[in-house]
Image (spheres, helix red, strand yellow):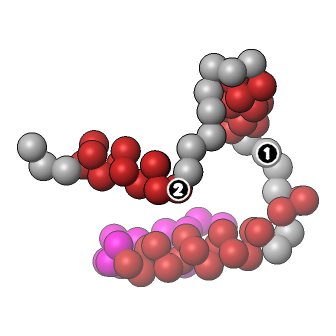
Amino acid sequence: MNADLVLPLETMTVAEKMDVIDRIMNDLSRSSSTVPAIAWHEEMLRQRAENIQNGKDRFITLEEAEKRIEKKIKPR
């Protein structure tokens, strides 16, 4: 099926597109065991877990993550 025939992507707003993405992700999450893993994503998760295990990375709190993001996007 060609998505361009089903959805008028060229005329949809960003909000409408995000709504469609959200609906698709919700639907896929109901059957996540049948959704194949993307190879690069699986490798990235494996590497991150390894980095946590060997101390190269660490978990941070949501508050710390928000502060880091805010600092990066704050106008100078």
Cα separation, mark 2 vs mark 1, equals 26 Å
Residue in view at x 69 percent, y 75 percent: 26
Q: Give the residue type that dot 1 points to.
A: Ala
Residue in view at x 79 percent, y 45 percent: 37
Q: In the image as oriented, which residue stretches furthest toward the right?
A: 33
Q: Which residue is mark 2?
A: 62
> In terms of image quadrants, where is residue 24?
bottom right
Q: Give SS at disc 1.
A: loop
Quadrant where the C terminus is found in the figure: top left
Residue 3 screen position, x and y as percent = 55, 68
Residue in view at x 36 percent, y 51 percent: 67
Q: Which residue is mark 1?
A: 37
Q: Nearer the viewer, residue 7 or 36?
A: 36
Residue 36 screen position, x and y as percent = 82, 49
Q: What range of the chain is rendered magenta?
A: 1-14
Residue 14 screen position, x and y as percent = 35, 73
Pointer 1: residues within 10 angstroms few (<14), some, or many (20+)?
Answer: few
Pointer 2 and pointer 1: residues touching (CB < 8 Å)?
no
Using residue 40 as the reference point, say whether residue 50 is left or right of it: right
Residue 55 screen position, x and y as percent = 69, 21
Q: Give the residue type that dot 2 points to.
A: Leu
Residue 51 visible in the picture? yes
Please report whichever mark, 2 or 1, sits nearer to the chain's N-terminal start.
Answer: 1
